[in-house]
Amino acid sequence: MTEQPTAAPLVEMRGIEKSFPGVRALQGVQFDLRPGEVHALMGENGAGKSTLMKILTGVYQPDGGEIRVDGQPVTLPTPHAAQALGISIIHQELFLMNHLTAAQNIFIGREPRKGLGIFVDEAKLKRDAAAIFKRMKVHIDPGAEVGHMTVARQQLVEIAKALSYNARVLVMDEPTSALNETEVEHLFGVIEDLKANGVGVVYITHKMDEVKRIADRVTVMRDGQYIDTLPAAQTPMSTIIQLMVGRELADQHRATGTGTAEEVLRVEGLNRGSTIRNVSFALKKGEILGFAGLMGAGRTEVARAIFGADPLDSGTIRIHGREQRIATPADAVAQGIAYLSEDRKHFGLVTGMSVRDNVTMASWRRFISGGVFMQDDALGRVAEDYVRKLKVKTPHIHQETRLLSGGNQQKVVIAKWLLRDCDILIFDEPTRGIDVGAKAEIYRLLEDLAAGGKAIIVISSELPEVLRLSHRIAVMCEGRITGELDGRTASQEDIMTLATQRSSAAA
Amino acid sequence: MTDTAVQPAASGKPGFFTTQTLQKAVAFVVLIALIAFFSAFASNFATGANMVGIMQATAVNGVLGVAVTFVIISGGIDLSVGTMMTLTAVMAGIVLTNLGMPLPIGILGAIASGAFMGAISGAVIAKLKIPPFIATLGMMQIARGLALVFSGAKPIYFNSTPNYGLLSPESTISKLIPGVEIPNGVMIMFIVAIIASIVLTRTIVGRMIFALGSNEEAARLSGINVDRWKILTYAICGGICGIAGLIVSSRLNSAQPALGLGYELDAIAAAVIGGTSLAGGRGTVIGTIIGAFIMSVLTNGLRVMGVLEEWKIVVTGVIIIVAVFIDIVLRRKA
């Protein structure tokens, strides 16, 4: 198989359409992959990259459009059908069985048999796995348990598994997100070998320098649409970033304030494994500090660490100038820090309990008479009060919170912390799963809270949201704060540049 | 995602026909139907003596059911309630018979030792992060072993405490209201149930238990000291086991160290039949008491009808599965 830039495409996707209830995820998207090329697929979170690749690998069915493999139109009703055509995917989160060996994982469901087909031929299993590893030029013991391997090695096992299906198309979804520099180099070596053998690789990534390193072409997607396909080597990074964020800011409203001079929170030298690296920042009263970055940049981890939900390796947290030891969420709440998780249903609300109980939960101990008895009437009055103030749409305060809409659930969580008198509010993706109308209402609520003297951190993956709300923006990448921007003047491009700045480039 | 559907809401109060109310109603109707059925087809069923027998049998399982209801609502499980009951009975025997202390001290000894052992289970679960199933499986054996060790593997009789029968077989109420032959053990069960119900629905303790069982992580992130409440929950469960230990030993006029295994399954069954969700966060004491009555009416009725004793075990198994299935169906509709 010789390398020709004009080789007939292995895979062609044209006019792909896909809708989910309430969302048009893909609109007329095209994509093609040639043998022996690495084709990077880029775009912001929610641009539609994963949906497109799920269609290519048979996980989703397209509503419209055509897929051709080797020039022949095909349907891919199941992941199995895609595998049969040589299309495999390496997910960001690996799907391996930790207690089985590398060889057992590779051939799961297809084990060679012996003795009337009753027994697994373990020897052959190992031989076959070893042969694949040899072809990949990696040294992995086929008999080693996968659970004891590093993520990098597990990834190689996944790749070996794909190759065992004679994969000619390999989709890799952010394969380097959990790897260190050496491991990344090793992986690139494996990819180069795959290329030389005519395998086409779709490489989903957020990291510019990786695209420059190994991709032949780049396709950019945005808001479920195909934007452009460009040669990776000749296209400047800034052009790619611009294509990724391209849309005009729908709402030109910008944060205007700067907060007061009074420093409420100062974080210095925060470290936790490889997820938080030397993070320092300060937060002032009346200020909204935005935390921007791509998924997995470490923003949620920083928030959880400050809140005492996860332990820190090192670092100091000062509140109102005083150093505080925060070991548990209870400590954080006692210091007036509240954390509003992006995953409201798991971490924010007790969905089976009523609006009243959720609003008052963090303050229950203030509503006790006779040592143990709950003052349910008082709880009800307070809850009614907050329901009115925050305009929570609920038939009554006894409604279970699981029956409320996303926006109203978020308001219930906000009410919980306001009642608890927290003055440092950390919002993690405050409008995730909330419809457009309710979003504007949440934005106004956050602005009112800041104007009323609360100090607010907003973690958001939606750039327009960060720009809309933040007085100041801290951008994170790979556990580090790569830069701080003024909310009044920052652009989406500024943020994306910092958010894709890898450690090597940041120096 | 069908859970965003808006429920038709009446005034400012929760709807009457919540799943929980409905489920209790179903359990209650089943209980009445069983009593009606056995009264009609078993001539010896609806006699005063038999009714007292049923109530006697319900008392112990009912109290243990209430104990385990606390833990199950909090999202846990306690397999040690049966042998814990035995251990606390032995403790009462040691305090009253071996040490010759007065009755109140014996009562205190039983309840306190149960609460202490329960707190240990709770601490093991909360602090060492051992799953409740395993931790209490261990505690089940520990309590069983300790009961045998402390008693020298022999029954301890309460002959030196003449008024020990007050705790179960005697009927104080029949002296006040002649004809109402409800044994004290049953009265104690009702009192325990009423207090437990108030604790669960009206106090901070109950609110925390429901919060833990509904979403422990959300509770933790609300600044609640989850570990402490969890330990308290298991301690309450152990304390109530102590009450069951007093009732059972009073009825037998002895602490039987070999007794206890298997009681935990009946107690869990009573809670489940009464609509307490093993997933946590949902359940009522009244439901558990109804569940305990369903089990003893069934056992007794089948025996009176002359059905082979072994069959009632089979029927109990079927009832548990049917009850949980009803629970699933009702919840799907909600």
Image (cartoon, coloured by chain):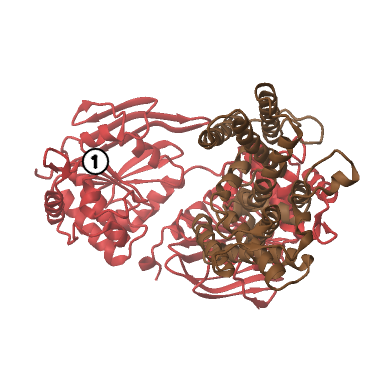
Chain colours: A red, B brown
Quarter of the image where one finds residue A250: top right
A440 vs A131, left or right, is right
- Image quarter where the N terminus of chain A lies is top left
Q: Nearer the viewer, residue A133 or A408?
A: A133
SS at mark 1? Answer: loop
Q: Chain of mark 1?
A: A
Question: Compared with residue A62, is residue A102 higher up or lower down, i.e. above or below?
Answer: below
A499 vs B140, left or right, is left
- The residue positioned farthest toward the top in the image shown: B40
User: Percent position (x, y) of residue A373?
Assistant: 81, 55
Within 10 Å of disc 1 (Cα), the crowding (few <14, some 14-19, many 20+) is: few
Residue named by callout 1? A109
Q: Nearer the viewer, residue B257 or A462?
A: B257
Quarter of the image where one finds residue A363: bottom right
User: Percent position (x, y) of residue B220?
Assistant: 62, 59
Q: Amino acid at mark 1?
A: Gly
Q: Nearer the viewer, residue A201 or B282?
A: B282
Question: Compared with residue A47, is residue A375 higher up or lower down, i.e. above or below?
Answer: below
**Residue at 59% from the left image edge and 70% from the top image edge:** A327
Quarter of the image where one finds residue A110: top left
User: Percent position (x, y) of residue A497?
Assistant: 44, 58
- Image quarter where the C terminus of chain A lies is bottom left
User: Percent position (x, y) of residue B67?
Assistant: 66, 52
The answer, for residue A37, to whether it is visible in the render is no
